[in-house]
Each structure stands twice: as C-alpha cells, then as structure tokens.
Amino acid sequence: MGLVQAVVGAVGGVLGDQWKDFYTVPQGLPSTAALFAAVPQGTNAGRGSNTSGSTNIITNGSKIVVPEGYGLLLMQDGAITAFVAEPGGYEWRSDDINSKSIFAGDGLVSTFITQSWERFKFGGQPGSQQAAFFVSLKELPDNRFGTQSEIYWDDGFLNTQVGAVTRGSYTLKIVDPILFVKNFVPASYLQPGKVFDFTDLDNAAATQLFNEVVGSLAPAFSLYTNDPSKGNRITKLQQDSLGFAQS
C-alpha cells in the first residue's frame, strides 16, 4: 500500500506542478511587516485551476510580481540564490527537476517520467525546497517603545543624577536585505504563511531589537545633555528629536 501511495503521490504531484503560478504579495499585511513569503494566486474572480501544486515548489515559467517598495529574495534548498530590488514582473527559471513544466517548454520525458521517479524516491513528495520572499525596502513606522521604570543619567547642566520614564516610537529601514535574512531573521520565518513583523510580541528577534533600543536610551540622554559644544538641556528634547536621535 505504501508503494501504491507513493506512486500516486508522485504522479499526482507532478501533474499538479505543471501549471504555471502567479505570485504576489499576500493581502492584509501590517505596515510593520518586514519579510514574508510570496503567495501563489491559484484563482482570480473564480477563474484558475492551479489548486493542487506542491508547497515550496515553483514551476518554471511562473510569474512573480514585485511591487514598488519591496525586494524579492529567491531561495533554493535553504540557500539564497538571487535578489531583485527593482519593481516589475519576473519569470521563474530553474534547472531543478521539480520545477520543470511542459507549459514552460521543458521536455516531456524529463518533466513527467524523470520527475515522477525522483519524487517516488522521496515517498511521492518533491526532494527540493524553493521559495520566494518579499523584503520591505520601505520605512517601517510605528515601532513603539517604553520603559517600565525610570532610567538614570548624570546631567551636566543640573549637576545631579536625573531619571525619567520614556515612551515613544521609532522607524526602521532595512538597508541590506541579504544580510538581514542571513544574520537576523530566524529560520522559522523562512516558511510559507509566516510574516516577520517587528511589532509582533511573539517575535524573539524583534524583542531583542526592542531591548537594545531601550538599553541605549540612558547613554543617549547622557550624551545629549553633557555635550558642551551643543549646550543641550533636557527641556530641549521635544523640540530637537533629530538631534537626540543622533546622540
């Protein structure tokens, strides 16, 4: 029975993956979403038949639309293979056997027979993982912060230790998407359906960044109020938010 199921799964998966896909940005994303997988649009206005393709397999000839303000990151078996920062429509092409399609001009033998045999070796499923991710290149606003208790610093003007409870928000911008994915994003977010959101309370990496921002406040206050060349006082802070941010 396992042999029959594997054969059925292999052939059925190959047939389902022959259709070209149309990938785009998922709907309902928050403005603070930094990284998320491209989603295939299986139907549009009730039209479309590609509803049984394999997860993590992108068929040759599939189109990926990159909107303004986003970059496209392509991955194959866990490795980054390409990055695109220009908006527009792009066609997926891969030499991987699992991506081949008769609709993309690939040969009939390599598409059906070879692909089915390779999938049979893995119990009927593809032996590869392909993914397309969008990375936001926009400013990510409304990242709120606050301190639960007072933070203290030595104030040169008042000549004493000063404490304050703070709250506010800051804006982030990803300047190196590849480095961001390699060194900061946990592997658990490099999956379909996952959204890396800096305001997600369950996002450990975002929480780490939040803690670093809060931890930098006391030194920033000290630098701002104790720079004799600027003559800054804490009362100027609200009128000089840019100057404080550069502290």
Image (cartoon, rainbow, N blue to C red):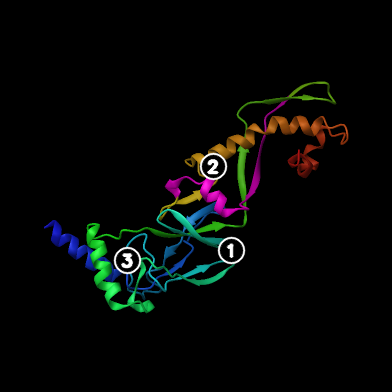
Question: In whole angstroms, how far apart are the C-alphas of marks 1 and 2?
Answer: 24 Å
In front: 168, or 243?
Answer: 243
**Mark 1 closeness class: few <14, some 14–19, many ≥20 residues within 10 Å:** some
Local crowd at mark 3 within 10 Å, few (<14), some, or many (≥20)? Answer: many
Q: Is residue 176 magenta?
A: yes
Q: Residue at x 35, y 78 (%)?
A: 103
Q: Residue at x 60, y 45 (%)?
A: 143
- Can you tell which mark lies on residue 206? 2
Query: Comparing marks 1 and 3, which lies closer to the viewer?
Result: 1
Do residues under tags 1 and 3 come within 8 Å of each other at their CB atoms?
A: no
**Residue at the spot of label 1:** 85
Rounded to the nearest angstrom, the CA distance separating label 1 from label 3 is 27 Å
Q: Identify the image quadrant of the N terminus.
A: bottom left
Q: Quadrant of residue 51?
A: bottom left
SS assignment at label 2: helix
Q: Around disc 2, counting alpha carbons within 10 Å, would you say few (fewer than 14), some (14 to 19), or many (20 or more)?
A: some
| Image location of residue 73, percent across then percent down | 51, 59
Dot 1 or dot 3: first in sequence order is 3
The x, y position of residue 22, in whole percent, is 43, 70
Q: Is residue 99 magenta?
A: no
Give the mark nearer the N terminus: 2 vs 3: 3
